[in-house]
């Protein structure tokens, strides 16, 4: 529709509309003097001047008297809808002020996370904080709720009796099933989603908008299903979970629309020249524009896969924002998304009826008393919890307004940690949230010196938090620290000034001992005794060339390192490196063996622990690596007679990226799986290839 056609349609509709008193010319003029309409990006329509009456009607029809100039409807229902939404949003008090709705008293009251994040007292307070941060992300002017279509043949939820019977049957199946590998995790007992999973019988693989399900019986590969949810063209399946007879898909959803807005320009002195009774505003120009707006949301699809060849949709949950991460503890999923807020929040709050500012979960806005506010922030970290047996029912939800934070999830708590530069030094601010069967509540907040550089440098153990950091002085000289905080994030122990001039590259905690790698030109491995949390004690130090980016315990007496070999004099990289440390005596750390892979320059195993297969019981070490010519190989090693022994190297198709490959074992069969191909091998027959399959949509 052209601009002229649009204006003609508006004028025709205007003749049939009664203008409410609240938008008479005098009222509009008073409001426009104090407000500027937001200017959207991606403009391509020309400016034009029209009469004030047409402006009133144009804004009324498009905005529903909310003044954000977004088109809704050209009939009275739009006016009534906007007015009723605003009425539900606020309540007028005797003094004329507005208050937000009362919180849900049925839920446990949320607590402040110390002084770092405090619970909002109203939606207006949230708008004020967001507006003061002047938050804006180009291309995401608004974020609307994006719902998922429900399947017409959605299965009935399990009853409690049926679920109990299923659990008993599954326990029997698992006891009879061969052992199989699982996703490499940051915290044992806290599951994480991934591109590829197995349940010991089938391999589930994500590729764009499809999930391929492959039968692995006896290593003979057979694709039995290609699951394709009803998604928009731009949507994609990110990762998945598999739990017994339940398959969970995490989908990034995009809802793009063409919106229309207007901007108003005044001429100096035009107010004096306008006639009071003319019905015209002192406007010289009105610019109408179209803008492409994209709303982002994350959808959790839950399928019953009792029959893996025919998955049945059980339900969906939709949460505003980009997918950030997720965790699964038992039957409870914790979903984290991130939302960037629009500019001019105070101005747009009048139209915040569909989650454009305050995010929604399943079309319901997060209550203000579940929202944590800092002094300022331009993003919202949204966390909600669901039971996989009741996927459409939200157990709890919170939003933390922030700029950015990393997430660590222990068995009982969620920790958000972020860097802050203060008084010429870097601090790590930590906020703790207790989790209990899906319920989420803040505990406290604290700060420690330095920044966290490795995902495994932070760990919750016996209600204490251990954290390794690296700090820098004014001359950029580095040193390292270990801090122990109690259940309330009170400092109870510390060890500072470790390895001056070096930085922490990798870390691991084993019960009451911390192991970590620092690096300058050599690779020191340190061991710290944490048996007395109030007095961490350095036990031993071992220096070798190169450095490890990833550490993995190999039994109780050894520690596997994956990293780089370097020249100790120049620091030049010489190739990938495997190293096995003897940690049986933490005071006298030793290197048992090291292997330099000089034909590889990179492996995703160094930076994404999900890409690593390291299984002591099966004696398997597997990872993908890239050659100097960008070819990708998958390497399988074993630890035999105190040496690394290569079992197999398999070249992968050029179209496969190294970070999308996973090594899986089921019984005595080994599988190299990617989003497009799976190959099986017989472990008991020198890893001889058994079967190969290319997955089909």
Image (spheres, grey):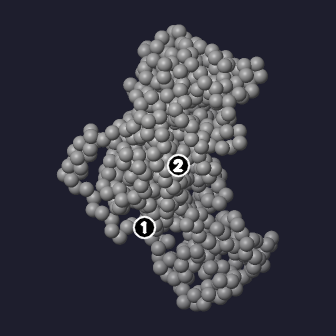
Q: Can you give x and y, in whole percent of width and height, for residue 3 in the image?
A: 69, 82
Quick one: 435 or 32, which is closer to the camera?
435
What is the quadrant of the N terminus in the image?
Answer: bottom right
Characterize the local packing of mark 2: few (<14), some (14-19) or many (20 or more) Cα atoms within 10 angstroms: many
Report which quarter residue 363 is drawn in. Answer: bottom left
Image depth: mark 2 or mark 1 in front: 2
| Residue that appears at 56% across and 41% down | 650
Quick one: 683 or 112, which is closer to the camera?
683
Q: Can you give x and y, in whole percent of width and height, for residue 469 in the image?
A: 59, 25
455 on left or right of 219:
right
| Residue that appears at 54% across and 13% down | 589
Which disc, if any, is residue 674? 2
Which disc, if any, is residue 149? 1
The total of numbered circles placed on residues is 2
Vertically, is 654 above or below 62?
above
Which disc, if any, is residue 391? none
Residue contact at pointers 2 and 1, CB within 8 angstroms: no
Q: Can you give x and y, in whole percent of width and height, for residue 673 in the image?
A: 50, 47
Q: CA distance from mark 2 to mark 1?
A: 29 Å
> Regarding mark 1 in the picture, which secondary structure is present there?
loop
Quick one: 558 or 687, which is closer to the camera?
687
Report which quarter residue 576 is drawn in. Answer: top right
Q: Is residue 653 visible?
A: yes
Vertically, is 255 above or below 329?
below
For the view shown, which residue lies furthest in the right direction?
268
| Residue that appears at 59% across and 70% down | 257
Going from N to C along the chain, the mark reached first, 2 or 1, is: 1
Characterize the local packing of mark 1: few (<14), some (14-19) or many (20 or more) Cα atoms within 10 angstroms: few
Vertically, is 258 above or below 571?
below
Q: Can you give x and y, in whole percent of width and height, for residue 391 in the image?
A: 35, 55
Vertically, is 588 above or below 622?
above
188 on left or right of 287:
left
């Amino acid at each position: 529709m052209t601009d002229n056609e649009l204006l003609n349609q508006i004028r025709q509709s205007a003749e049939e509309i009664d203008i409410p008193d609240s938008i008479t010319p005098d009222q509009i003029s008073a409001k426009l003097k104090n407000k500027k309409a937001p200017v959207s990006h991606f403009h391509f329509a020309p400016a034009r001047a029209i009469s004030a009456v047409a402006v009133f009607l144009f804004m009324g029809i498009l905005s529903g008297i909310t003044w954000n100039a977004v088109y809704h409807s050209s009939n009275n229902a739009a006016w009534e809808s906007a007015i009723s939404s605003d009425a539900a949003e606020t309540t007028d008090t005797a003094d004329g002020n507005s208050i937000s709705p009362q919180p849900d008293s049925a839920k446990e009251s949320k607590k402040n996370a110390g002084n770092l994040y405090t619970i909002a007292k109203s939606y207006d307070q949230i708008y004020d904080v967001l507006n003061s941060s002047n938050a804006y992300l180009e291309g995401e002017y608004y974020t609307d709720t994006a719902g998922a279509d429900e399947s017409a043949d959605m299965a009935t939820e399990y009853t409690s009796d049926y679920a109990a019977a299923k659990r008993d049957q599954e326990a029997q199946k698992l006891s009879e099933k061969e052992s199989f590998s699982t996703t490499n995790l940051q915290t044992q007992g806290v599951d994480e989603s991934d591109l590829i999973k197995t349940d010991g019988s089938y391999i589930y693989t994500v590729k764009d908008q499809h999930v391929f399900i492959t039968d692995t019986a006896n290593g003979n590969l057979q694709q039995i299903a290609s699951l394709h949810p009803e998604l928009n063209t731009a949507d994609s399946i990110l990762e998945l979970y598999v739990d017994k007879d339940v398959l969970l898909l995490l989908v990034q959803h995009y809802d793009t629309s063409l919106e229309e807005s207007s901007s108003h320009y005044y001429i100096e002195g035009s107010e004096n020249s306008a006639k009071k009774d003319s019905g015209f505003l002192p406007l010289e120009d009105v610019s109408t524009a179209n803008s492409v707006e994209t709303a982002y949301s994350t959808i959790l699809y839950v399928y019953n896969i009792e029959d893996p060849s025919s998955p049945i949709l059980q339900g969906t949950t939709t949460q505003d924002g980009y997918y950030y991460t997720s965790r699964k503890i038992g039957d409870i999923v914790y979903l984290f998304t991130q939302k960037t807020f629009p500019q001019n929040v105070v101005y747009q709050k009048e139209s915040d009826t569909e989650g454009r500012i305050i995010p929604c979960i399943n079309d319901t806005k997060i209550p203000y008393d579940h929202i944590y506010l800092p002094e300022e922030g331009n993003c919202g970290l949204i966390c909600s919890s669901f039971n996989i047996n009741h996927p459409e029912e939200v157990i709890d939800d919170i939003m933390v307004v922030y700029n950015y934070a990393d997430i660590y999830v222990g068995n009982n708590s969620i920790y958000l940690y972020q860097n802050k530069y203060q008084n010429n030094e870097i601090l790590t601010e930590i906020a703790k949230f207790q989790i209990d069967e899906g319920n989420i509540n803040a505990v406290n907040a604290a700060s420690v010196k330095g920044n966290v550089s490795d995902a495994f440098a932070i760990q919750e153990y016996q209600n204490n938090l251990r954290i390794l950091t690296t700090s820098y002085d004014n001359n950029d000289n580095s040193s390292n620290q270990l801090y122990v905080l109690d259940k309330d994030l009170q400092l109870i122990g510390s060890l500072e000034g470790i390895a001056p001039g070096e930085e922490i590259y990798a870390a691991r905690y084993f019960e009451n001992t911390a192991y970590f790698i620092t690096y300058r030109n050599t690779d020191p491995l340190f061991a710290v005794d944490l048996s007395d949390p109030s007095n961490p004690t350095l036990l031993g130090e071992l220096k070798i060339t190169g450095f490890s980016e990833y550490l993995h315990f190999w039994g109780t007496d050894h520690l596997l390192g994956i990293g780089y070999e370097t020249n100790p004099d120049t620091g030049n990289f010489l190739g990938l490196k495997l190293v096995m440390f003897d940690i049986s005596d933490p005071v006298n750390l030793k290197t048992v063996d090291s292997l330099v892979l000089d034909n590889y320059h990179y492996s995703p195993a160094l930076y994404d622990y999900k890409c690593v297969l390291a299984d002591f019981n099966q004696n398997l070490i597997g990872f993908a690596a890239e050659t100097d010519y960008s070819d990708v190989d998958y390497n399988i090693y074993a630890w035999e007679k105190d040496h690394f022994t290569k079992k197999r190297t398999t070249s992968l198709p050029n179209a496969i990226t190294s970070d999308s490959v996973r090594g899986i074992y089921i019984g005595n069969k080994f599988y190299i799986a990617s989003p497009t191909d799976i190959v099986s091998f017989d472990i008991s027959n020198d890893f001889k290839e058994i079967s190969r399959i290319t997955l089909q949509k």
